[in-house]
Amino acid sequence: MDLEIPKKDLLRLVSRCQGVADKKSAMPALANVLLSADANTLWVSATDLYLGVTGHLGSQVKTAGSVAVPARDLLERIKAMPDGLLHVTTTEGAQTTIKAVGSPRRYTLPGIPGAEFPQLPTAAEDAPRLELPVDLLALLIARTHFSISTDETRAHVNSALFEWSGDRVRMVTTDGHRLSKMEATVSGSSATATMLIPLKAIHELRRLADEARAEKDAPVVSITQSGPNAFFMIAGTQFSVKLVDAQFPPYQQVIPAMTERSIRAPRAALADALKAISLAASDRTGGVKVTVTSGSLRITSESPDTGNAFDELSVDYDGPELTIGFNAKYFLDVLNGVDDEEVILGISGELDPAVIKAGNESNEQSYVAVIMPMRI
């Protein structure tokens, strides 16, 4: 293989791929990224056998070929190169040399032949394809990712449920203590899909979506479900993920159909108060007490080890007094993920779950979070 490519382009491609490369795998090839050149295009790929990512860019290819080189080592050496064109060559023994054009600086890396790199899955040509704005994908993830369980032994909740029904798309996550659901209408589209996307894939999708939004070069993301895999095409990068084969909890049964009390509160002020009071909460439980009375909401924390804390803010509420305990972090995760000026807090009793909704609900977009109470 013999080609020339601008440093900034190669750096962007390798950066997007190296996050998927599995540095701890028993298969050494999985710690590599695959460089493949054909015609006037360079392809860069990585996989851990569950996730796969491939990006491509035009380059000056003199000799086609492929080689796999250690992902982290390659990234560090590209960063250390001066700006401008880089000359990439490989030998028959898969040794790879990167040299800066017009500069004496160069690196040589050991590699393996491209043919020994695991083959990434591909979607069937007749697989149905969905399209939605990349901004919407980023929003779905931002408002739900924090309530995915981090327990990898519970695959059914160590993932996000992604559903597409007609012109409505939704993402739901839960860890058993809380639940988040975001859904929206996608104009001009009608399809059906259900997939469980593992947590690691959600992190990568969020990163790819944020990069595409920052570069403003990807108005839509194309989604294809084919066999056990899902494929996301974002800004010229294809991301594949092996879906979780499990049954997501029946989330509709967790969300209360209605609550006895409804409190409208300023989001930023509530988040600030919760953050302040949580400083005195137990490190083990993170529990705080929330008391609502007519026109006000009080937050308190009492601990023989960490002391006491108190704060109060004005809210739109006219009803009987009620005190209920919550994990402050669960509340803060929701409030930090919503950008509305106000939120609506629905509660019924001290042993009933709380429902949090964005203040500006609409038919186009809706968000709901459910937080289970705790005894304090």
Image (tube, grey):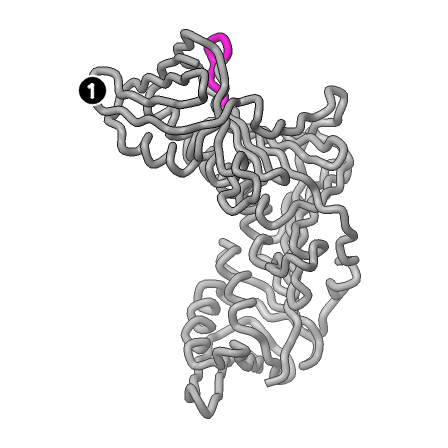
Eyeballing the image, is 66 above or below 117? above
User: Where is residue 80 drawn, in percent x and y?
Assistant: 27, 33
Range shown magenta = 38-43
Report whether 310 appears left or right of 105: right
Check the picture and name the quadrant holding the C terminus. bottom right
Q: Is residue 216 visible?
A: no
Eyeballing the image, is 277 above or below 10? below
Please tell me whether the stretch drawn in magenta is mainly helix, strand or loop: strand
Residue drawn at (76%, 21%), measured in percent from left and top?
Answer: 126
Q: Which of 285 and 254 is in front in this view?
A: 285
Residue at which label 1 appears: 103
Residue drawn at (42%, 35%), measured in percent from left and top?
Answer: 15
Residue type at mark 1? Ser
User: Where is residue 66 drawn, in percent x and y?
Assistant: 50, 19
Report whether 3 appears left or right of 373: left
Residue sticking out furthest to the front: 93
Q: In which quarter of the image is residue 147?
A: bottom right
Q: Can residue 167 be seen in this view?
A: yes
Q: How crowded is mark 1: few (under 14 residues within 10 Å), some or many (20 or more)?
A: few
User: Where is residue 195 drawn, in percent x and y?
Assistant: 72, 42
* Residue at disc 1, secondary structure: loop
Residue drawn at (71%, 76%), measured in percent from left and top?
Answer: 352
User: Where is residue 145 drawn, in percent x and y?
Assistant: 58, 53
